[in-house]
Amino acid sequence: MKKTLLFIVLLLLSCSESYPQTISKNNFYFEYWKGEDYYNSREGAFSRNYEAGYDRNLDNNVLVNLNSNEIDGILKSMNMNNVNNLPNNIKCGLLPIKDAQFIHIKIYFNDKIKEIYFQYNRKKSELDCSKAIRFLNVSKKIDSILYNKSQVKKLPQTNLFYE
């Protein structure tokens, strides 16, 4: 009897999340900011920022559409890393990060929005690093797809850097 009651309580607690446990393909798209790059999967719009006056003739906006397999791979990574249960703000300094000081993702699905900001923080290395690893796994999956697209590879690297 006690085991049954405990099972029911645990079941009710696990179902009380404000978001579903998985992100479905239903009305799914995402926006992704990493350093000076921005991507919107619904529009297929990728842009990169440069220092003012860098090259006024340079078109820093390109069209980058993801195919069904790529979208499925990103969804799988989001679900495997349980992004719905991540906090909206994550700071960590223990992980070996060599590029962006911040990463921001906004996920739209089933008429819901999940938004997560990651900030690399060298001063407080103990902050949310286990959650950061899950978030960075998703970021790496997106990067592995997005930055291997020929349209993105053709863009010059940004000349904006943070100290």
Image (spheres, grey):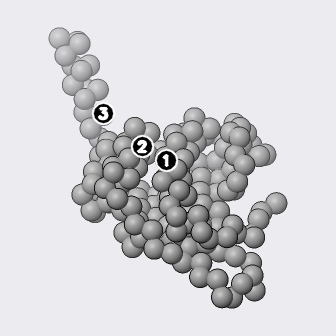
Give the residue drawn at x 24%, y 21%: 7
Mark seen at residue 77: 2
Mark seen at residue 115: none
Task: Give the x, y percent position of residue 86.
Answer: 47, 45
Give the residue drawn at x 23%, y 12%: 2
Quarter residue 47 falls in:
bottom right
Between marks 3 and 2 in the image, the one whose residue lies nearer the viewer: 2
Left/right placement of residue 46 relative to residue 156 reads left
Between marks 1 and 3 in the image, the one whose residue lies nearer the viewer: 1
User: In the picture shown, does residue 98 fall above or below 32?
Assistant: above
Task: Give the x, y percent position of residue 40.
Answer: 45, 68
Task: Give the x, y percent position of residue 147.
Answer: 55, 58
Q: Secondary structure at mark 3?
A: helix
Q: Residue furthest bottom?
A: 56
- Asked whether the residues under the numbered discs 1 and 2 touch, taking CB atoms below 8 Å apart as contact, a structural biologist would say yes
Q: What residue does disc 1 label?
A: 141
Amino acid type of the residue that numbered disc 1 sits on in the rendered structure = Lys
**Residue toward you, 154 or 121:** 154
Q: What residue does disc 3 label?
A: 13
Q: Is residue 46 visible?
A: yes
Give the residue drawn at x 75%, y 81%: 54
* First in sequence: mark 1 vs mark 2: 2
Amino acid type of the residue that numbered disc 3 sits on in the rendered structure = Leu
* First in sequence: mark 1 vs mark 3: 3
